Image (tube, grey):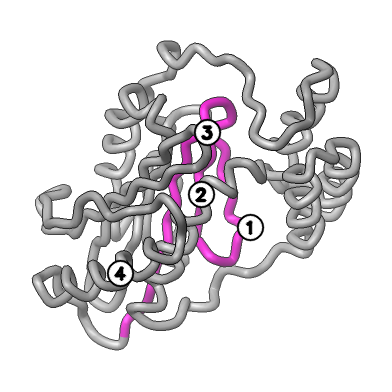
Amino acid sequence: MRRNKGKLRLALLAVIALGIAFGNSSGQALKSPAQPYLEAGDRLYEQGKLKESLSAYEQALAIDPKNQYASFQIIQVNVRLSSGENAAPGALPARDYSKVSRELGPYYKDPLNKIALRPPAGWLIDNSDPRFQVKFIDPHYEAFVFVKVIPTPKPVSIGYELQTRVENLVKNLAAQIPNASLKYLNFERLVDETVLRVEVHYQAGPNLIIINTRLITDLQRVVIVTWVCPERVFIYFRPLLESSVATVTLTPQ
């Protein structure tokens, strides 16, 4: 949803900027032919033009019948239209966050980039965005996981040089966006490997968005895994999202 994309702007920019820090993208992620209609639908949704946005999403789905993001958006718009909900951007229905599932789904495997990750059960998979290898979307609670693989000309070591480089990059980025700040940047262990963890907080209206990124290096690539959720669901989603990130496999069989 575009309201989510507004909240996720820093997350998207952060992952893209981190990618730039290590070199250009591999160029293997192809842009879906439905993308212009998805973007148009998002813009219209943000403006509160629900019927127009629905038409754009339906056109996107007609072009790409397997596009899960278009399917998801069509459901969301129809729910708002049928409920007579005010079309004001950012309006959210009441939700019972205590019922969030704690289960992980089956592994999502990407043989092209040689990675695998177990997303939370029931989440949607969107691999149409050229900025990421894959994006996992919770259909009800506004939480996301982004995965990006960056090829590097030589091995990148997790160490103080990388920490300083990433710190400067994220601070400069956060300074360009109101109400955003770097809250944590340090090393941690993940599946017997040392990784760099970055946490950024971003105030989007009344919502505090928590953005957690893990940078994992493996030979000639950096795997960037970022999960995002609003603070109000943090207590429920943190164990699930961290468990999901911990299942990253860099050379799946």
> Can residue 253 be seen in the rendering of this structure?
no
Residue 132 magenta-drawn? yes
Q: Is residue 160 magenta?
A: no
Q: From mark 4 to mark 1, how far is it between C-alphas? A: 21 Å
**What is the number of the mark on residue 76?**
none
**Most foreground residue, 192 or 210:** 210
Q: Residue at x 54, y 77 (%)?
A: 27
Residue 236 position, x and y percent, is: 35, 22
Q: Which residue carries the number 2 mark?
A: 8
Q: CA distance from mark 4 to mark 3?
A: 26 Å
Q: Secondary structure at mark 3?
A: loop
Q: Earlier in the sequence, mark 4 or mark 1?
A: 1
N-terminal label among 3 and 2: 2
Q: Which residues, given as a range, are shown in magenta?
A: 123-152
Disc 4 on helix, strand or loop?
strand
- Say which residue label 4 marks: 222
In terms of secondary structure, where does tag 1 sit?
loop
SS of the residue at dot 2? loop
